[in-house]
Image (spheres, rainbow, N blue to C red):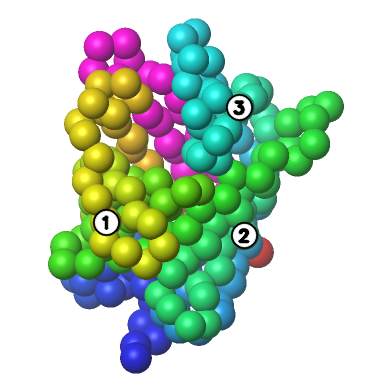
């Protein structure tokens, strides 16, 4: 049983050392440890395309999409590594004006039999494979396909049709130059024909 930081193991030592110091601290949660960390910040924008409302019922069902839009949205994100596994849990708490706090929850674990890859799961076993890299100090996640898993069973790849419907995801966390406690984050889902479907971005600080 190892207690190295989960992303240090996923990336490998060379890539891990290429990350900015604030990003390494952010992802210092160790496998099998119960470690936790909270970051707080504001989203410059939370946005969706005009036709993206068609996807919102499925997004609500799977807990996979933020259903509201806004600018300058306060947010905190709670991360925790389970004490009995290398699984990382996310709870993203969006504070949209005039609405109850919206929680976007998921968990992530290293992809078995694949280097530099994790899988992020939402409700009902829907997962997104993400290739992970260190680029100019930033931690970058790129969409590598959808999977489905029931309980602890095997992962089943889902058809590429989902990418034609939803587009592909890209996420990055990047250090803020001159501020060793801050980083920026952006997420977008981009369709090959219609451009951005969903996106959000903001600036955060570690507790």
Would residue 135 be counted in the magenta stretch? no
The location of residue 116, given as percent across then percent down, is 21, 61
Tell me: 159 left or right of 166: left
Mark on residue 67? Answer: 3
- Circle 1/circle 3 CB separation < 8 Å: no
Mark 1 or mark 2, which is nearer the start of the sequence? Answer: 2
Mark on residue 78? Answer: 2
Residue 200 drawn above or below residue 91: above
- Circle 3/circle 2 CB separation < 8 Å: no
Give the total of numbered labels.
Answer: 3
Tell me: 182 left or right of 76: left
Q: Main secondary structure of the magenta part?
A: strand
**Which part of the image, by quadrant, shows the N terminus?**
bottom left
Q: CA distance from mark 1 to mark 3?
A: 27 Å
Report the residue that reaches farthest toward the right. 98
Q: Which SS class for mark 3?
A: loop
- Residue at 34 percent of width and 55 percent of height: 149
Mark on residue 155? Answer: 1
The location of residue 195, given as percent across then percent down, is 33, 15
Is residue 135 in sight in this rendering?
Answer: no
Crowding near pointer 3: few (<14 within 10 Å), some, many (20+)?
some
Mark 2 or mark 3, which is nearer the start of the sequence? Answer: 3
Crowding near pointer 2: few (<14 within 10 Å), some, many (20+)?
some
- Circle 2/circle 1 CB separation < 8 Å: no
Q: Which SS class for mark 1?
A: loop
Segment colored magenta = 182-206
**Which part of the image, by quadrant, shows the C terminus?**
bottom right
């Amino acid at each position: 049983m190892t207690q190295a930081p989960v992303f240090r193991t996923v990336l490998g030592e060379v890539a891990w050392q290429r990350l900015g110091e604030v990003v390494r601290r952010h992802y210092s949660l160790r496998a099998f440890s119960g470690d936790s960390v909270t970051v707080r910040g504001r989203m410059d924008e939370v946005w969706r395309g005009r036709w993206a409302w068609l996807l919102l019922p499925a997004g609500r069902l799977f807990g996979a999409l933020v259903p509201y839009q806004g600018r300058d949205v306060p947010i905190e994100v709670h991360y925790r590594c389970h004490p009995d596994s290398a699984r990382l849990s996310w709870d993203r708490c969006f504070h949209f004006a005039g609405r109850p706090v919206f929680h976007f929850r998921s968990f992530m674990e290293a992809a078995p039999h694949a280097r530099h890859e994790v899988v992020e799961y939402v409700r009902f076993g829907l997962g997104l494979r993400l290739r992970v890299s260190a680029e100019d100090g930033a931690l970058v996640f790129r969409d590598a396909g959808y999977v489905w898993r029931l309980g602890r069973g095997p992962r089943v790849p889902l058809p590429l049709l989902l990418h034609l419907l939803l587009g592909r995801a890209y996420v990055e966390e990047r250090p803020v130059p001159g501020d060793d406690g801050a980083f920026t984050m952006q997420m977008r889902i981009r369709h090959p024909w219609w451009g951005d479907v969903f996106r959000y971005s903001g600036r955060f600080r570690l507790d």
